Amino acid sequence: MVYDHKSIENKWQRYWDEHETFKASDKSEKEKYYVMDMFPYPSGQGLHVGHPEGYTATDIMSRYKRAKGFNVLHPMGWDAFGLPAEQYAIKTGNNPASFTNKNVQVFKNQIKSLGFSIDWSREINTTDPEYYKWSQWIFEKLYEKGLAYEDEIMVNWAPDFPGGGIVVANEEVIDGKTERGGYPVYRKPMKQWVLRITAYADRLLEDLEDLDWPEAIKEQQRHWIGKSVGASVSFNVENSAKKIEVYTTRPDTLFGAQYMVLSPEHELVDVITTSEQKDVISNYKKEVETKSDLERTDLNKDKTGAFTGAYAINPINGERLPIWIADYVLSSYGTGAIMAVPAHDNRDWEFAKKFDLPIKAVIEGGDVVEAAYTGDGVHINSGFLDGLSKQEAIDKAIDWLTENSAGHKQINYRLRDWIFSRQRYWGEPIPVIHWEDGTQTLVPESELPLRLPEMTQEQLKPSGTGESPLANATDWLTVTREDGVKGRRETNTMPQWAGSSWYFLRYVDPHNSEALADADKLKYWMNVDLYVGGAEHAVLHLLYARFWHKFLYDLGVVPTKEPFHKLVNQGMILGENHEKMSKSKGNVVNPDEIVNNYGADTLRVYEMFMGPLTQSKPWSEDGVSGSRRWLDRVWRLLIDDEDKLRDHVTTVNNGDLDKIYNQTVKKVSDDLENMRFNTAISQLMVFVNEAYKSDALPIEYMNGFVQMLAPIAPHLAEELWARLGHENDISYVEWPTYDDSHLVEDTLEIIFQVNGKVRGKATVARDTDKDAMLELAKADENVQNFITGKEIRKVIAIPGKFVNIVVS
RNA sequence: GCCGCUGUGGCGGAAUUGGCAGACGCGCUGGACUCAAAAUCCAGUGGUGGCAACACCGUGUGGGUUCGACUCCCACCGGCGGCACCA
């Protein structure tokens, strides 16, 4: 009988379901192991072959750890809020909720068909009111602690969009136009909810140290947080009581400041501009307003700016500095104003060249006529800083600024607060009520969840005011207090990041109606031991989740400072042509077809055998059929044409497989421990190749082999396990061990080198010493060809490995 | 521009500590089985030369350290990902 993947996979998937094989117990003497994937957005397209890569990796780890005696939590859920469902609803009139649930069903069936050992009783869905109740609860806590506030934020406003205008996300803006329809986009300030993530900047930075994460991701987060140490310096404006505050990392170059630049949006611009310069300035501001961020940065090769007519006084030497505005200074970083030191800053240098401003060198080294010099050096033309090096001068300048009340040491971050509101329907409602008396309150905790109202297709269309479509839900929108005062609900909803910032906590206790999760259960399960997902979430998701987790830690809700101990990014699976899979390139592979034609076990084996988990690698249909052929080969090794266990599987051990079996147990265990699935599979292949050469297959070794196969190809392994005569399933059978004594042999092969090149080999006794090795080498015919008539200058010998004769 | 990753046969990849480069798989070639084919099993397979033993070359490029370098150091080139006027 041939290996029939369909019946085997159906049989065992049903078995696991019926026996609740993978249900994780919250109380156990065993050590816990919490392993999870980044949960998917259930799109209408269904699963992609990229999904099962990470899922298979976590499943192998789950199954391996169960066999190693751990109590494993391996859950799955749905990140189901998001724009596509809302757009689909507007287009077709379908309800986003039912559309989403349909997609979830498709995803779930597909994932189940791959045989992952997931505890489905813990399935969660971010759009479930019982789930988002707690997303809202966390928001309320942030609000109470002053970490959620409203602010005027620049948004992408497309006023011509049908229906009367819509706010679009950055990624929906292409060349200054909306991705859909191509309507022009303007930047416009709008009141938005913002979360004070910057309050956690230092901790988010410091605690990266202890995490077992890829260095690349940590580096990206560090850069994103962007901590810098410098000084705040205050400049008086000539003939004015106003002061301009700047942030600089180079207070040592203060004597080289030649002009100042404010960002066009700086609040002092209109105040200090002289009447002669008013038109110039307002024209420049208008010019900048229509520019997107991209145009102000990427596409801007040429510095632009305008003179305000005003002057500031350099506190360190009393010099008059003209005040300019320019879009190369960003309002969102530092104070939105800089002191320009053209001799020692590239951007200031370019600006000075363009507008013919003076350039004064204050550090030796480089030619400031040709380019800005940003390196270290001896300070010149700098009064009391002359002769000092960079760091000495920085320290001394800060001391001077502090003593003279002109500034102080300052730490700055690139990280900005998290804009938390979206002008959308399909997201968690923000539980705030704006009362007509001008006050604002949270929806009382007892009334959570604040559910999304049902909306018609007509209501889901843009409100026209830039508000979310929830502004159209009249009944839901207005509330009346006991004292008769009317209120209007907040119409903004939360971003998709909200639900994904804490879902790993909910898996621990998914049905709790009293708390987001029970404290004891959290204490047992947290933190996540292994988290696998794509590198595209390097910064945002992982930073937001860390922020919320730290906040919850401060509240005493969670017991750990960090949510994810070990993070692994799986690489991308490319198309056969080595390009990213996409519909337009026609190189997309549908996992359903692979499961149908070859089986889930084949897909799992292939995706793990392709190469290292973390690297991108191209798909190959030949590779898939090769993996299937190997599983066929495994089947035939144990099962004969009559569908019976082969006769040569016996209790007799003739010793043929002793060495290779023990080697295999050692290598496979070690490889799985380190998630080197490709080499683990290759070792299993080597073992099968050897087993094919042996007349007798000791049942003990066959049991061990099937166990090692089980994490990778679980359906086939369960079937073979049963046919090997076991009554119980394989999931919790203790992992095989190896016997070291079979790994050492009495004789081994050593190599003879001359000048580092291999010239011969010999099999020798294990304990052959250096001198004996050298004699054997000298006696080797080919070695003699290279040493005869030459002087032996040196001999390097490592017993058991090699002897190297160095001749002149 | 900056940060990170990466470069090995016809292809995917292996080499865990500086010690036989190319494990394993795909593909290809040959053999066995078959009337034949497919499937399967067995063997071979980096390049050049040689009947062979073997020799020379070979891990992106150029240099270096070392008895010995895919591995360590310096400089450069290509590919992928991320960030980008951050003062």
Image (tube, coloured by chain):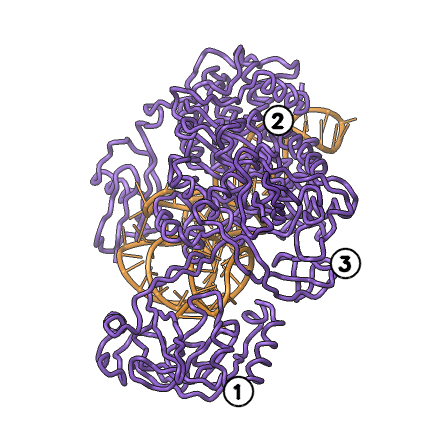
Which residue is identified by label 1?
Answer: A275
Q: In which quarter of the image is residue A376?
A: bottom left
Q: Which of marks 2 and 1 is in front?
A: 1
Q: Which of marks 1 and 3 is in front?
A: 1
Q: What residue type is labelled 3?
A: Pro
User: Counting residues from the N terminus, which is met first, the one under dot 3 or under dot 2?
Assistant: 3
Do the residues marked 2 and 1 share a common chain?
A: yes
Colour chain B appears in: orange
Viewer-proximal residue, A704 or B67?
Answer: A704
- Chain of residue at mark 1: A
Q: In which quarter of the image is residue A553?
A: top left
Residue A543 location in percent, x, y?
A: 46, 49
Q: In this view, does A168 lie to the left or right of A521?
A: right
Which residue is identified by label 3?
Answer: A162
**At 71% across and 34% down in the image, what residue appears?**
A102
The image quadrant where one finds the N terminus of chain A is top right
Mark 2 surroundings within 10 Å by alpha-carbon count, few (fewer than 14), some (14 through 19), many (20 or more): some
Residue A509 location in percent, x, y?
A: 49, 28
Q: Which amino acid does label 2 sit on?
A: Asp
User: Counting residues from the N terminus, which is met first, the one under dot 2 or under dot 1?
Assistant: 1
Viewer-proximal residue, A563 or A651?
Answer: A563
**At 61% across and 59% down in the image, what residue appears?**
A170
Letter of the chain shown purple in the rendering: A
